[in-house]
Image (cartoon, rainbow, N blue to C red):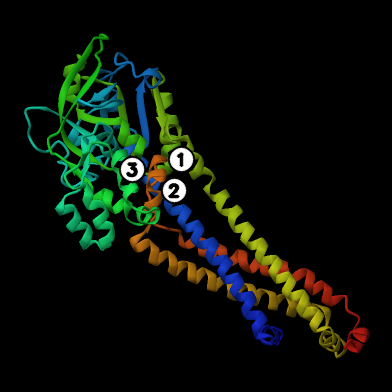
Amino acid sequence: MIWKTAWKNVWRNKVRSIVVISSVTIGVFAAVFTIAFMNGMIAQRVDAALDEEISHIQITGKGFRLNNDPQIVIDENKEVLSLLKTEPGITRIVERTIISGIAGTAVKSTGVQIVGVDTKMEKEIFNLHKKIIPGTGDYFETPSRNELAFIGQDLAKTLNIIKFSVDSTVLNNLKEKGIPENVLNSISSLSGVRFNNENKFTKTVSSLLTSKEVKKYGRIIKQEAWTYREGSRLTLTFLDKDNNLVGARFKVTGIYDVKNTMFEGSMVFVKKSDLCKLAGIDTNTFHQIIIRISNIGQTEAITSDLKVKFPDLDIVSWKQLQPDLAMMTDYVHQIYGLFMGIILAALAFGIVNTMLMVVLERTREIGMLTAIGMNKKKVFSMIMLESVFLSLIGGVAGMFVGWIAILLSAKNGINFAQYAQGMEALGYSAHVYPEIGAGFFLLGTILIIFTGIISSVYPALKALKLNPVEAIRTE
């Protein structure tokens, strides 16, 4: 009977109940979707770091990570590789040769890290070969008499290998993509002009368009004006193992795009055999071992075990290589808990305020119920159930709306193209796919019910303090 009475009481003032339920729904939806968005963004960054950049564990000779000294090598004859293959949890191993150097063209040069790789084995650990920009080549697949280099899009822009130009084809493509005629007329004056630098092209386009047009169409125009001549070349210069300056011309075999400005702008991949030959390094030695494991949760345990087995080597996990990302993943649940706590606190205050109004409005009624024999336990239960019903309806509705929003946005993702440059500079993709585990919804529902119960205590105690005789006299 108490449950039925409490349910009817919730709907006695429909407008107020709907307002409270709506506010709870909006608050819970905002919390759920924001947490899913943050979770998706962090998960994407972790996956990108492990699949494209650093993997789970890296091993180098003592001191190599400090200065990339080419003389600090790991000898294959020390049986390090064979021992690693027997370690439980390790699924893939690949060796690399690494040298710091300078990449240059006729007009530009910049410092890079030159990585000599076994192209076949690399595909088993990293998926850079899947990140090739269409029309720029391949991942060391086309036979060539030249030394080949696989470079990032940002490095190609820095070295002016990627250029920008507007011609009739670009204008037609932009028209097909819905760019207004007045915008096309404004940039048509650039026909025939070739820009070697992205910044110059961006500034020129910005000078021809309004700020609103640049914000809306600038990125699309830049993408269409992007040009690359397949087979472009660059020079790699570095010190060999004997500190002699050496260099060679490399043909660009392909350009990758991994949405990480720093990585793209500094990492050049070449065949290990080519780099060893130029640097005078024995092909049976290497500078770095990359390890892939089956379960990311075992990373620290395997790292600690390897440190014991190989005390003369530097062994670091991905969390040591990317401490900022490690901090985000380690404290992400605390961040989610804090965010959810703020939402639940706001929910609690709203419920308390509403139920206090209910108690004050129904002072006479509560007094009569007490006078005819309803004990304090039942009065307390009635007020508590009303609070729980209000919070539960709003909470479940908010969870459901959040779940629908996550499903819809996760299908195609949320594109923050206008913030791409800033986000990619930090290593995060501007195209985010929200995601969240099913367990979160169950936990969220339990917390909402708990909040409803806690919120009902003060109003219910207020009702219990009413004197039946005085309450009945209340108008």
- Please say if 444 is above or below 49: below
- Please say if 247 is above or below 471: above
Tag on residue 203?
Answer: 3
Q: Which of the two discs, 3 and 2, labels the residue nearer the N terminus?
A: 2
Q: Is disc 1 surrounded by few (<14), some (14 to 19) or many (20+) residues within 10 Å? A: some
Task: Please state which of the two labelled residues, at mark 3 or mark 1, is closer to the viewer.
Answer: 3
Task: Identify the amino acid type marked 3.
Answer: Lys
Residue at the far bottom in the pictured view: 372
Mark 3 vs mark 1, CA separation in Å: 34 Å
Relative depth, front residue between 119 and 198: 198
Indicate the quadrant where residue 120 lies.
top left
Tag on residue 195?
Answer: none
Badge 1 is on which residue?
325
Q: Is label 3 in a helix, a strand or a loop?
A: helix
- Please say if 359 is above or below 221: below
Badge 2 is on which residue?
42
Relative depth, front residue between 99 and 424: 424
Q: Is label 1 in a helix, a strand or a loop?
A: helix
Q: Which of the two discs, 2 and 1, labels the residue nearer the N terminus?
A: 2
Q: Residue at left 19%, top 25%? A: 106
Evaluate whether residue 179 shows in this view. Answer: no
Q: Residue at left 24%, top 13%? A: 240
Left or right: 100 as drawn, with respect to 66: left
Residue 235 in the image, given as x and y percentages of width and height: 19, 24
